[in-house]
Image: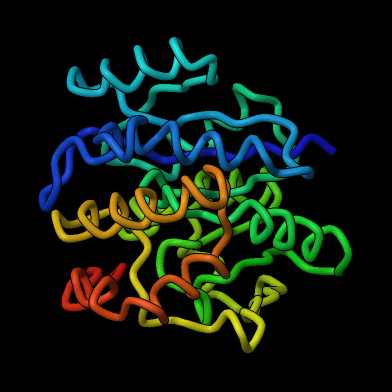
Amino acid sequence: MRIVASIEARMGSSRLPGKVLMDIHGKPALARLVDRLRQCRRIDDIVVATSTGKGDDLIQDWAQSYNVPVYRGSEDDVLQRVVDAHRYMGSDIVVEITGDCPLLDPETVDLAIETFLANDCDVAANVRIPSYPQGTDVQVFRTKDLEKVAATIDDLAVREHVSLYFYENPSLYRILHMLAPRSGQAPDLRLQLDYPEDIEFIRRVYEQLEPVHGPFFGTGAILDLVAQAPDLAAINAHCIEKTAR
């Protein structure tokens, strides 16, 4: 089976426009995320799923320069955009990633894929039961299941939030909710990129950890750093994500 990670990314953002290409210790945020995904043992390829909007020409240009496949589709119908991106890539298994996770741990991604493959399930994910830090999100499911949702469901929230239908219909889908190990449980810690405070936090994390651990330091190293410097997590602790509905 062909396993492909798709990154949903746009330049538009109400809180932090252009966030996915903002510099993080010498590299754009998307480059940081792609580099981490390239460390995964279980991923066959990566595709950036962006929109046809003029502003996202910058993402296409960057992706081509970084040798990453890119697919452009609807700005508002994210579900169809992701489905079409995986058709373009010939995917059997979708690894859904959002472009605001430049601290995503490759080991977490591989664990999600292995959990999906080793069990009789339709979805394996760590996003619905809080235990992992925010911004280390990964979801794994079959392309054909997502195609069916895209072909039959018109709900605007479902069209915007790619995997929402799976979680809202647990009687139809067998979902494995991954929980972080006890030492890695930090559901209140924000590692994603959505506010100006987030970019400040993420830059400081890279500045402190990359010289010591290299660019692919894991979640454990981040948790150790925050434990030693609690003022770091306070930078963006007040920021709140909007809900799907």
Q: Does 233 appear above or below 81? A: below
Residue at x-position 41% and y-position 69%? 134
Q: Nearer the viewer, residue 127 or 29?
A: 29
Location of residue 125 (image quadrant): bottom right
Q: Nearer the viewer, residue 109 or 155?
A: 109
Q: Does 19 appear above or below 240? A: above
Count of numbered labels shown in the rendering: 0
- Residue 145 visible: yes
Residue 178 location in percent, x, y? 65, 76
Residue 223 location in percent, x, y? 48, 74
Residue 117 location in percent, x, y? 84, 58
Residue at x-position 16% and y-position 60%? 197
Location of residue 237 (image quadrant): bottom left
Q: Nearer the viewer, residue 120 or 224?
A: 224
Using residue 128 as the reference point, say whether residue 144 is left or right of it: right
Residue 115 location in percent, x, y? 79, 65
Q: Residue furthest bottom?
A: 182
- Residue 168 visible: no
Q: Nearer the viewer, residue 142 or 209?
A: 209
Using residue 84 as the reference point, say whether residue 115 is left or right of it: right
Residue at x-position 50% and y-position 62%? 137
Location of residue 108 (image quadrant): bottom right
Residue at x-position 14% and y-position 40%? 17
Using residue 79 as the reference point, say whether residue 59 is left or right of it: left
Q: Quadrant of the N terminus?
A: top right
